[in-house]
Amino acid sequence: MNFVQSVKDFLALIYPEGCEVCSQSLVNGESCICSTCWYELPKTGFYRDKENPMTRIFWGRVDIVSGTALFHYQKGGKVQDLIHRLKYKGQQEIGCYLGMRLGHYMLESSIYRHLDSIIPVPLHPEKQRMRGFNQSEVFGEGLSRILGVPLNTRVLQRLSATSSQTRKRRFMRWENVESAFSLNNTSILENKHVLLVDDVITTGATMEACANKLLTAAGVKVYLASIGVTV
Ligand SMILES: [Zn+2]
């Protein structure tokens, strides 16, 4: 253990970590978010029902089995603040923690029993280089730990903004998220149950584009999970 880590551990003993929502000190058994804040956060409970307001976003658009989000998402709300800390302040532990919490809920549901793989929505390569990590991947890592399902960060890729396809798209003044992703291997997804994960679902356009790519593999079943959803 290096000196800096020793000092950090020592400080953690004197000044216990605070809740990421209210900043109050966490007590024994709590991590990341205190019990009071956890109770008050707007959880969806969508994991219980195969058909729910989140899956309805995709009806008539893309054939998914079911989807769940941990929280209802509102602009200016506590969930937005948590996701902001995760994405822009580098607090990756929040994403992992929320993935683990959602994973525990999903274990209670029979819907997600047969998952083979967890696939995070990829970031633009330039954005990932700047941020240093992909928030959806960190969230997926938390889910993976609890569900015991491996994370696959390679099979689905986001095309670089400098790729010829994107340049062509810009030239045509035609933006379509549909063409922003590519699948580099369809055979490993054949007949698999795949959980596609993202941080927030608003219009559902990104998830729809990614799910459509995954569905090019024969017999694949797609499920969705996110931290927040605007329904
Ligand atoms: Zn709190």
Image (cartoon, helix red, strand yellow):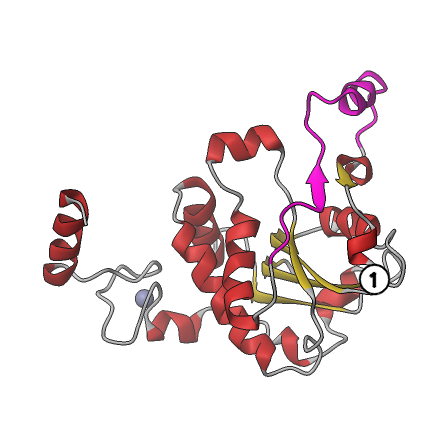
Looking at the image, which is closer to me, 134 or 57? 134
* Marker count (numbered): 1
| Label 1 neighbour load within 10 Å: few <14, some 14-19, many 20+ | some
Q: Quadrant of residue 24?
A: bottom left
Magenta stretch: give its range: 151-175
Q: Which residue is mark 1?
A: 220
- Residue 95: give x, y in percent of width and height: 47, 56
Is 168 inside the magenta-drawn segment?
A: yes
Q: Residue at x 46, y 69 (%)?
A: 41
Q: Residue at x 32, y 70 (%)?
A: 34
Q: Is residue 150 above or below residue 52?
A: above
- Residue 147: give x, y in percent of width and height: 57, 71
- Residue 30: give x, y in percent of width and height: 30, 72
Looking at the image, which is closer to me, 219 or 34? 219
Callout 1, which amino acid? Val
Left or right for 138, reference 63: left
Q: Is residue 208 above or below residue 66?
A: above
Q: Quadrant of ligand 1?
A: bottom left
Left or right for 165, reference 141: right
Q: Residue at x 66, y 81 (%)?
A: 48
Is 72 inside the magenta-drawn segment?
A: no
Left or right for 2, reference 42: left
Is residue 43 something one can see in this rendering?
Answer: no
